[in-house]
Amino acid sequence: MAGIWRLWFFATILAMWWVLSADSTSTFFPPLQKILTQLYDLWIVGDARRELWSSLGHFAIGYPAAGLLGIGIGALLWKFHRVGHAVSPVLYFVYVIPTAAMLPAIVAVMGIGSPMKIAVIVLAAIWPTLLNTLDGMRGIDPVMLDTAKVMHMSSARTVRTVVLPGAMPQIMAGLRHSLQISVIMMVVSELVASRSGIGFFILEAQQRFAMTEMWTGIIVLALVGSALTFLFIAVERVVLAWYLGARAVERKG
C-alpha cells in the first residue's frame, strides 16, 4: 500500500509539473515536455551516456571501498577497544569536517583525474559506516560474548556468528548514509574539478546557458540516486530479514 501511495504522489507531482510548465517561456524553467524530449535525445540515444557511465564508474569503486574500509576499521577499533576509545574523539572530530572543504587540498595533491574523484567519495563516505560499525559492535550484549567464550569459539568465529549479525542493523544504517554521501560527493567532485561526469555536464550546460540540458542532467542524477537507494533497500531487506521479522513480531505482540 505504501508503494502505491508513493507512485501516486510521484505521478501527481509529475503531472502538475507538466501542466504548470506547458506554456512556460522562461529560459530557466522550460516546459517539462521539452526537457524530457531532450533527455531522450541526450541520455538515451546521445553521447551524454558517457558522462553517466563515468560517474557510475567512480561510484562503483568509491562506495564499496568506503563500505569495506569502514566496516574493517570499525571492527579493528572494537577488537582493540583501548585504542578505539582513545581515538573516538578524533574520529568524531574529523567526521564533522566537510570533505567538500578539503577539495582544494585533495585536487592540489591528486589532480583532477579519476583517482581524485574516487578518493573524495571514499574520504566522505567512510565515516558513517565506520562509526556505526563501531557503535553497533560496542552495543553487543556482553552475555552473548561471554557465551561465545564459554563455548570456546575463536575470535574470528565470534565476530562472524555473534558480533557482525548483532551489529548488522547499525552497519546497514551506516551503509545507507554512506550511499547518500557517495552520490553527493560523486557530483561535487565533478562540479569542482572535472572534465567528465554528470556534475560536469550540469555545470557546463549552466555555463553555456543551455538550461534545458542542465535540467536533463539534474533529472538523470535524481533518477540515478533513487535507483541506487531502491536497490540498497532491496538488499537491506534480504540481509536484515531476520531482524525485520523480529521487529514485526514485537509490534504485533
Image (spheres, grey):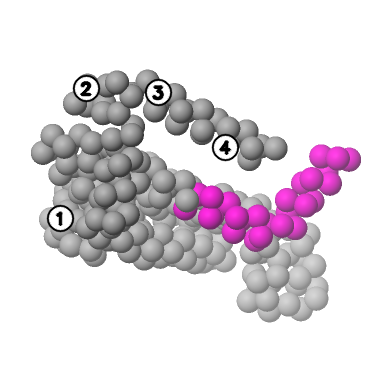
Q: CA–CA distance between discs 3 and 2?
A: 15 Å
Determine whether, in the image, residue 200 is placed left or right of residue 242.
left
- Say which amino acid is labelled 4: Leu
> Is residue 152 rendered to the left or right of residue 90?
right
Percent coordinates x, y for residue 188 in the rendering: 27, 46
User: What residue sits right under mark 1 in the picture?
Assistant: 195
Q: Is residue 250 left or right of residue 80?
A: right
Q: Nearer the viewer, residue 105 or 208?
A: 208
Q: Earlier in the sequence, mark 2 or mark 4?
A: 4
The magenta-colored residue range is: 228-253
Q: Position of residue 181 (x, y in %)?
A: 40, 47
| Residue at horizontal 51 percent and vertical 33 percent from the top | 11
The residue drawn where x is 37% and y is 20% is 20
Q: Secondary structure at mark 4?
A: helix
What residue is pinned by disc 3? 19
Which comes sooner in the sequence, label 1 or label 2? 2
- Please tell me whether residue 249 belongs to the stretch shown in magenta: yes
